[in-house]
Image (cartoon, grey):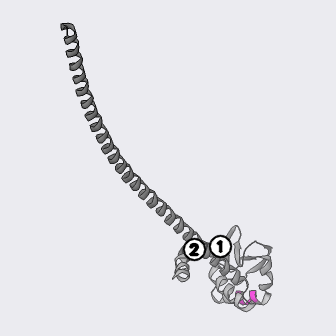
Amino acid sequence: MSGANKLKEKILAEAGSQAADVLTEARLKSSEILTRGEGEAAAKKVSLLELAAVHAGERRSRARTIAELDARKAILAAKGKMIEDTFKQALSRLGLLDQKAYQEILFTMLLAAAQTGTEEVIVSQADRARFTPEFLARVNQALTQQGKKGNLTLSAETSEMQGGFILRSGEVEINNSFDSILGIQRDQLEPEVAAILFS
């Protein structure tokens, strides 16, 4: 065998050995990279699953909070409607009182509201029949006993109202309609009404 062939074989043997070593090292590195990659992927998967669970919990909590707020709003709206209906029914029932009971309420209100006893009494068209001459005479007599003039008169003018009256003296009007009185007293009455309705 010539020296050139020996050299060639030696170079090829060394190259083969180096190639085997490089290939073995590459396989080891590849295996390490794959193992590390699988570990990182598994850790990333666990991290993502934990994060997804946290986000899902937060979304569930937010959805529950929103549902609870919506439920509270609906309950408050229903309670508000019940209170409103109660005030409307009260006004309606006042209008349905019999003549005697209705006149007794108005008698007390007129005595308290009349300043001079010479005012004009404005009522609704529906209430004109309740203000009989006898009723006005009784009110005027009671006003005289209070030291006032006792000369209230029923106005020819009517007003849109749900019961009660308006007293007019010149340009000054005192609104004693039931809806006006309830409107003024509503802030004070509402807590009591709510306590009765929702206790």
Q: Residue at x 65, y 83 (%)?
A: 109
Q: Which amino acid, by three-letter code, is at mark 2?
A: Lys
Q: Residue at label 1?
A: 180
Report the side of 128 relative to 88 (left or right): right
Q: Is residue 119 above or below residue 45?
A: below
Q: How far from the left and from the top, in percent, is residue 186? A: 58, 74
Report the side of 177 relative to 53 (left or right): right
Report the side of 71 relative to 151 (left or right): left
Q: Residue at x 54, y 78 (%)?
A: 194
Report the side of 149 relative to 13 (left or right): right
Q: Residue at label 2?
A: 79
Secondary element at image label 1: helix
Q: Is residue 32 above or below residue 132?
A: above
Label 1: how many residues lie within 10 Å, few (<14), some (14-19) or many (20+)?
Answer: some
Q: Magenta residues?
A: 135-139
State yes or no: residue 19 in magenta. no
